[in-house]
Amino acid sequence: MLGLVYLIWLSLRKLKLRYQGNQPSRPEVRRWRRYAVDLPVRVIVPNEPEPRKMILARGTELSRGGMVLYVDLSLRRDEAIEVEFQTPSKLLVTGIVRNHTNHCFGLEFLTPL
């Protein structure tokens, strides 16, 4: 009995090794496509004691519904911030912090771009 289990395990292992490199990549499940960018932005935190305190930051990935933001702030999950894009028209969007690692924050825009 043990020999049969071992033979089945060996054959499954060979199949796994044979098809491991040929597996199709997983399709993107996001609503909007992400674009790699390097954008200077300004972050405005409404809950700060100083009114309209603007802090320089960097956007590294951008989609219609959000962005990845590097900023030297300690923001919490579900905290609202405003992001001002450095364009001639000074586009201002409000976003919610959905996740973070150190000073890298994933934002979801309240209204898609």
Image (spheres, rainbow, N blue to C red):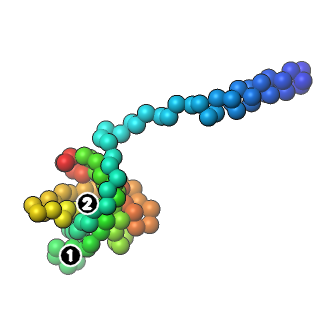
Q: Secondary structure at mark 2?
A: strand
Q: Which residue is mark 2?
A: 80
- Identify the residue at horizontal 75%, vertical 28% (top origin): 14
Foreground residue among 102 and 60: 60
Amino acid, disc 2: Ala
Is residue 47 in view?
Answer: no
Image quarter for residue 107? Answer: bottom left
Q: Is residue 101 left or right of residue 78?
A: right
Residue that protrudes farthest toward the left in the picture: 89
* In this view, 74 is above or below 50: above
Counting from the top left corner in percent of width and height, residue 24 is at 52, 31
The residue at the point 30 percent across, 68 percent down is 57
Task: Measuring from the top left, give residue 60's x and y in whole percent.
Answer: 34, 58
Q: Position of residue 2 (x, y in %)?
A: 89, 25
Question: Which quarter of the rendered picture does the N terminus lie within?
Answer: top right
Which residue does the image show at 44% across and 62% down from the upper left? Answer: 101
Amino acid type, residue under disc 1 in the picture: Lys
Q: Residues within 10 Å of mark 2 (few under 14, many from 20)?
A: many
Q: Is residue 68 left or right of residue 87?
A: right
Task: Specify the quadrant of the image occupied by residue 4.
Answer: top right
Q: Residue at x 77, y 24 (%)?
A: 11
Up the image or down, 11 lies above or below 59; here it is above
Q: Which mark is residue 53?
A: 1
* 80 in relation to 109, above or below: below
